Amino acid sequence: MRSALKWAESKNLIDRAPKIYRPERPAPRDDRLTRDQIGIFLAHCTFPHVKLFVTLAVTTGARMSAILQLTWDRVDFDRGTIVYRDPEQGRTKKGRATVPINDMARAALLEAQRGALTPFVVEWAGSRVVSIKKGLASVGKRCGLPWVTAHVFRHSAATAMAERGVPMAEIAQFLGHADSRITERVYARFSPTYLRRAADALEFVA
């Protein structure tokens, strides 16, 4: 609305655009799982498709839509990568990365591939899984973590990388962020090495 009013002012359609108050951006949500909590959640996943989703979410940091839309032709076991961007859909507003497959994800993917009945990686009863929300809610309730949503796994993965000192630029690429400043704003505070050189430069002898 502010842009429209400014444009109207520039075209002399109105005398002066009124000042519009814009509230401050709210602080990002900080719901995240510890490594122990991730293990507990996985241990309570009784359905294989839910466990596979959670495994991919915590090992690749991908969004729910990217994981549920992932097809086997974009899982490259030889190169050890997952291509989350679907070339047939073009680019989306939310970035999707190409990420390495670690040992945990590889084991889960190989097991799932042996019983695959559809082109989609996450499937149930011979059909593609469109939503995983109910499955996650059921597991969360069972293991005492009812606040866990699909996005919590992505946030937890990024936090875990930051806590291990992974550079912000690498985390940004891993998450598919177009700008590492987004990553720094949210995750830099979890990194023990972020700005450490700056702090060390301020050591003084009394």
Image (spheres, rainbow, N blue to C red):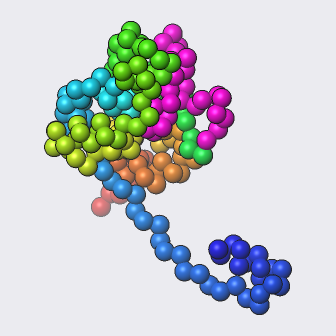
Camera-side residue of 180 and 100: 100
Instruction: Residue lying at the far right in this picture: please name it.
Output: 11
Quadrant where the C terminus sits is bottom left
Q: Is residue 165 visible?
A: no
Residue 192, image quadrant: top left
Image point (36%, 29%), residue name: 53
Quadrant where the N terminus sits is bottom right
Image point (62%, 84%), residue name: 19
Q: Is residue 29 visible?
A: yes
Residue 140, image quadrant: top left
Camera-side residue of 101 and 1: 1
Whole-percent x, y for residue 46 in the image: 22, 26
Q: Is residue 2 above or below residue 90?
A: below
Whole-percent x, y for residue 164 in the image: 34, 36
Whole-percent x, y for residue 43 in the image: 20, 28
Image point (83%, 80%), residue name: 11
User: Is 158 contained in the magenta span?
Assistant: no
- Range of residues picked out in magenta: 63-92
Q: Is residue 134 above or below residue 67?
A: below
Q: Is residue 123 left or right of residue 181?
A: left
